[in-house]
Image (spheres, rainbow, N blue to C red):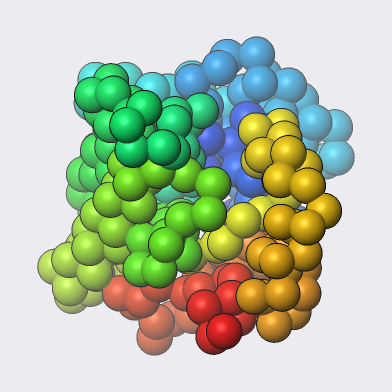
Amino acid sequence: MKRLQDRVALITGSGQGMGFAIAKALANDGARIVISDINEKTVADSVESLRGDGFAAMGVSMDVSNRASVSEAIDTVSRDFGPLQVLVNNAGGALHTPHILSEIEEKDWNLVVDVNLKGTFFTCQKTIPIMVANGGGAIVNISALAAHYRASLAGVQYTAAKAGVEGLTRQFAYDWGPEGIRVNAIAPTVTMTGDRVRGLWEGKGQEEQDRILANIPLRRLSEPREIAAAVVFLASDEASYVTGITLDVVGGRYLR
């Protein structure tokens, strides 16, 4: 029996990149996958890819920063696929906003906070009552090392939003643990996924790349599969007595 056999798992922002890697890892461990993204085409393509590999999958288009969109999408999942047992809040990131203080506008702040923090709140707010009614579940929020250390490729709007995600994680874990709901977070460092991150990394030049890698004891950046493996662990019963934590998957970066 696989660790997540037949559990319904929704992953936000999973049309591509890190989110899709997480979805694929959960599927490999037996979960029935709900691909969720704001882009309908990436949703359709990712669902087709999973089904082509023999996995059970459905897709919903969802804007996590919009409560009505979240509510409608999760209601559709409950009706057509079954009640959620695993929720992974992956949607977020710096969202192509500036990292230089003088260049950050109010719209940049609002976008990053709305998607990363408010979006995580909306999905949890909608999903937790469903999990309570069905005996519990597991929520994994994707934070970042920046939330409790510092950012390398993003601005203060990102660090603030992710710090909020970690606070939300702890509070939900405390409030809903008695109902059988575990809530944890994962904090990656720079992971080579997506054109934006790859472009920013390659734009730094060899000397700057070497300086960054010198501060990581494992001497490399993480890969999406390594973040996904941590998500699977926290979502599974192997982590049945783990709640309210943020697991750093960072290669030991802040040790130096």
Q: Residue 52 vs residue 34: left or right?
A: right
Tally of marks: 0
Compared across the picture, whether 29 is left or right of 232 comes to: right
Q: Position of residue 113 (x, y in %)?
A: 28, 37
Residue 26 visible, this angle = no
Write the residue at 71% across / 45% down.
Answer: 204
Q: Is residue 17 above or below residue 103?
A: below
Q: Is residue 61 above or below residue 122?
A: above
Name the residue furthest left.
175
Is 68 or 30 nearer to us in this picture? 68
Name the quadrant containing residue 170.
bottom left
Q: Residue at x 62, y 56 (%)?
A: 190
Judging depth in this view, the residue of 175 and 19 nearest the camera is 19
Quadrant location, the C terminus: bottom right
**In front of the other: 31 or 250:** 250
When asked about the image quadrant of residue 83, the answer is top left
Relative side of 18 to 125, left or right: right
Residue most extreme to the right: 53
x and y, in percent, of residue 245 in the image: 36, 76
Q: Position of residue 205 (x, y in %)?
A: 78, 47
Q: Which of the pair 196/244 is nearer the observer?
A: 196
- Looking at the image, the residue that sits furthest to the top is 41
> Looking at the picture, does residue 78 appear above or below residue 106?
below
Q: Quadrant of the N terminus?
A: bottom right
Q: From the top left corner, tell me how far across and down residue 207 is, in percent.
A: 78, 58
Residue at 32% in and 31% down: 102
Is any atom of residue 154 visible in this view? yes
Q: Residue at x 57, y 26 (%)?
A: 59
